[in-house]
């Protein structure tokens, strides 16, 4: 008996037509039936989750990049609105998005946070109930969405606390990017770090350089504090490999000044 395994050839971007917002407007409600399509006065389309209509939490709205929607946008249940198209008469502002959420049946909303994937970090508070935060790329947006999904109940219900948390992120978060290389270095698997190309013998060695790089910016902190650590894989690693790297990250952080560390948040 023989088993023949053929290589899976991925569909092309053109075939999937991922940059077409109308496809997302039809697809996302199938994934989450509580999503409702709302048209703004400027002609843009927003998907609003009606399941959050009576929630007392701050609403989270996401402006992603068409054709490259993060799995966080697709799966995280605390996200109340997703912007799939910005084509229309004028720029879609955070206040426009907040107004669309209210028109979809959300009442007594404590505040709205709009998270955008961009090229820089910035934060802008508009009045007492609307805040817009732009981050550098999809990975940082993933981190912010994860952070907003794991905060305390009091923070979720307070626009002021949420705003202060995001201001702290924009000011102090540090990141590192690395890529596992197809070519070996000194006979070992290799990884391209922020500081260059290097081989590694153990999984711990694969992440240590990046962890030391991001922790260097926080070395001067004193007293009790919380680490919020987000690890994203866009390299196509297996689930087991991701679990192993996650364990090594946890072990590394567990050794960082444990007498001063109040909590590790992953």
Image (cartoon, rainbow, N blue to C red):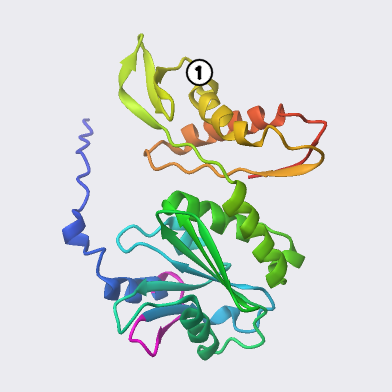
The quarter of the picture where residue 184 lies is top left
What residue is shown with label 1? Answer: 202
Whether residue 245 is visible here, answered yes or no, is yes
Say whether residue 266 is magenta. no
Residue 187 screen position, x and y as percent: 35, 9
Q: Residue 68: x and y, percent?
A: 34, 57
Point out the image quarter for the N terminus. Answer: top left
**SS for callout 1:** loop
Residue 34 appears in view: no
Vertical placement of residue 238 versus 66, above or below: above
Q: In this view, does 165 lie to the left or right of 73?
A: right
| Depicted 44 relative to depicted 171: above or below | below
The quarter of the displayed image where residue 236 is located: top left
Residue 26 coordinates in the image, percent (x, y)? 33, 76
* Other-residue count near label 1 (Cα within 10 Å), few / some / many at <14 / 14–19 / ≥20: few
What span is in magenta? 30-44
**Residue visible at 45% across and 49% down in the picture:** 139
In percent of the image, x 54 and y 51: which residue is there?
143
Identified at 40% across, 83% down, the residue is 37
Residue 229 lies in quadrant: top right
Quarter placement of the C terminus: top right
Q: Say whether residue 33 is magenta.
A: yes
Q: Nearer the viewer, residue 126 or 55?
A: 126
Please give left or right for residue 113 compared with residue 29 in the image.
right
């Amino acid at each position: 008996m023989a088993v023949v395994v053929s290589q899976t050839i991925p569909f092309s971007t053109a075939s999937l037509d991922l940059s077409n917002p109308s496809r997302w407007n039809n697809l996302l409600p199938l994934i989450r039936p509580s999503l409702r399509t709302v048209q703004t006065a400027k002609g843009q389309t927003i998907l609003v989750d009606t399941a959050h209509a009576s929630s007392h939490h701050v609403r989270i709205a996401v402006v992603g990049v068409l054709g490259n929607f993060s799995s966080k946008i697709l799966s995280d249940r605390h996200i109340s609105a997703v912007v799939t198209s910005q084509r229309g008469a004028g720029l879609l502002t955070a206040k426009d998005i907040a107004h669309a959420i209210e028109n979809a049946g959300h009442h007594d909303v404590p505040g709205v946070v709009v998270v955008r994937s961009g090229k820089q970090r910035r934060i802008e508070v508009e009045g007492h109930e609307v805040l817009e935060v732009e981050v550098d790329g999809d990975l940082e947006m993933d981190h912010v969405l994860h952070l907003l999904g794991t905060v305390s109940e009091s923070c979720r219900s307070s626009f002021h606390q949420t705003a202060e948390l995001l201001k702290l992120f924009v000011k102090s978060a540090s990141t590192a990017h690395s890529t596992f290389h197809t070519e070996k270095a000194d006979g070992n698997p290799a990884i391209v770090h922020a500081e260059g190309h290097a081989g590694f013998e153990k999984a711990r060695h694969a992440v240590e350089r990046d962890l030391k790089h991001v922790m260097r910016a926080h070395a001067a902190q004193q007293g009790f504090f919380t680490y919020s650590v987000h690890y994203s894989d866009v390299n196509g690693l297996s689930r087991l490999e991701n679990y192993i790297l996650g364990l090594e990250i946890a072990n590394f952080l567990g050794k960082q000044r444990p007498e001063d560390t109040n909590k590790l948040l992953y």
